[in-house]
Image (tube, rainbow, N blue to C red):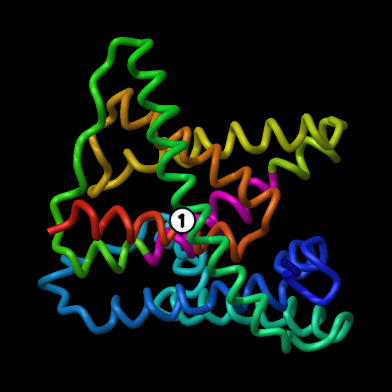
């Protein structure tokens, strides 16, 4: 079945481009912000996505109370610039079916991720004779939904777009590594950082090897998806996995 006018190869190329990838991720950002504003503070208890807090800190330090506005302006401004440049070079994103196939691909990848991450972790834990990881955090369902959407945007923005890209540059330019070795190092290191971040701060989990291993495996898979498929696909894959897990085990 043809996915785009020039076949599957054209779809995979187009879906990585900013005019599709960034616009595809926009509903996640809007959904997160709407929930963050709409939910009573008594329900959210001030909970925000940890990666978002890290990304905002520098803007708060530079602009004080205007930090949030500056952060939003920079994120949306850079995204708009990248989309505009891509549209100018390749034409407007008029093929709605590409977004439809991106949605189906993200759903499929989220399902594959759920099976692969759990199976890989279970096999390693079994080999190490360790217990399985614990359940979901003790916060209410709407707040977990908000955090799930935020994970797709902000965790992928920080750990994949910023950190993986920085590590790829470090490997290629600063250390002179080949493209494959640079990508491998970036994927592994970013996965370890991603996992470790879940144990930092007032809402961080208790550090335990089983959960650390599971999140490291998850980070490896998400980083691979980002390197191969771009930001929009990995953002939705992450969000859909988190939302699916929430619907299955959340109460």
Q: Magenta part of the protein: which range?
A: 149-166
The image shows residue 241, relative to residue 208, as above or below, that is: below
Is 228 displayed left or right of 204 in the figure? right
Residue at 40%, 27% (x, y): give it: 121
The N terminus sits in image quarter? bottom right
* Mark 1: secondary structure: helix
Q: Position of residue 218 (x, y in %)?
A: 46, 40
Is 65 displayed left or right of 23 in the figure? left
Q: Residues within 10 Å of mark 1 (few under 14, many from 20)?
A: many
Residue at 45%, 68% (x, y): give it: 60
Residue at 53%, 78% (x, y): give it: 26
Q: Which residue has dot 1 on it?
A: 238
In the image, 208 versus 51, the foreground residue is 208
The C terminus sits in image quarter? bottom left
**What is the count of numbered marks?**
1
User: Main SS type for the magenta part?
Assistant: helix
The image shows residue 83, relative to residue 129, as above or below, that is: below
In the image, 243 versus 2, the foreground residue is 2
Q: Position of residue 32 (x, y in %)?
A: 37, 74
Is 215 displayed left or right of 10 in the figure? left
Q: Position of residue 230 (x, y in %)?
A: 67, 58
Instruction: Work out which residue is located at the far front of the displayed protein and give it.
Output: 1
Residue at 89%, 81% (x, y): give it: 89
Is 232 displayed left or right of 166 in the figure? left
Residue 39 occupies quadrant: bottom left
Magenta-colored stretch includes residue 241: no
Residue 124 occupies quadrant: top left
Q: Position of residue 118 (x, y in %)?
A: 38, 34
């Amino acid at each position: 079945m043809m996915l785009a006018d020039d076949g599957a190869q054209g779809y995979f190329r187009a879906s990585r481009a900013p005019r599709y990838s960034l616009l595809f991720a926009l509903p996640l950002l809007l959904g997160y912000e709407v929930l963050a504003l709409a939910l009573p503070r008594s329900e959210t208890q001030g909970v925000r996505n940890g990666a978002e807090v890290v990304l905002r800190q520098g803007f708060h330090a530079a602009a004080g109370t205007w930090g949030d506005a500056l952060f939003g302006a920079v994120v949306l401004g850079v995204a708009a610039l990248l989309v505009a440049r891509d549209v100018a070079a390749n034409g407007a994103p008029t093929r709605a079916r590409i977004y439809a196939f991106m949605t189906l691909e993200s759903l499929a990848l989220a399902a594959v991720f759920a099976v692969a991450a759990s199976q890989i972790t279970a096999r390693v834990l079994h080999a190490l004779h360790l217990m399985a990881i614990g359940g979901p955090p003790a916060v209410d369902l709407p707040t977990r939904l908000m955090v799930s959407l935020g994970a797709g945007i902000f965790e992928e923005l920080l750990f994949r777009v910023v950190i993986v890209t920085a590590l790829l540059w470090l490997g290629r330019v600063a250390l002179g590594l080949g493209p494959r070795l640079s990508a491998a190092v970036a994927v592994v290191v970013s996965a370890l950082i991603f996992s470790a971040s879940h144990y930092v701060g007032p809402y961080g989990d208790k550090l335990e090897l089983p959960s650390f291993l599971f999140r490291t495996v998850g980070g490896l898979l998400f980083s691979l998806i980002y390197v191969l498929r771009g930001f929009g696909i990995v953002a939705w894959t992450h969000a859909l996995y988190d939302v699916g897990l929430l619907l299955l085990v959340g109460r």
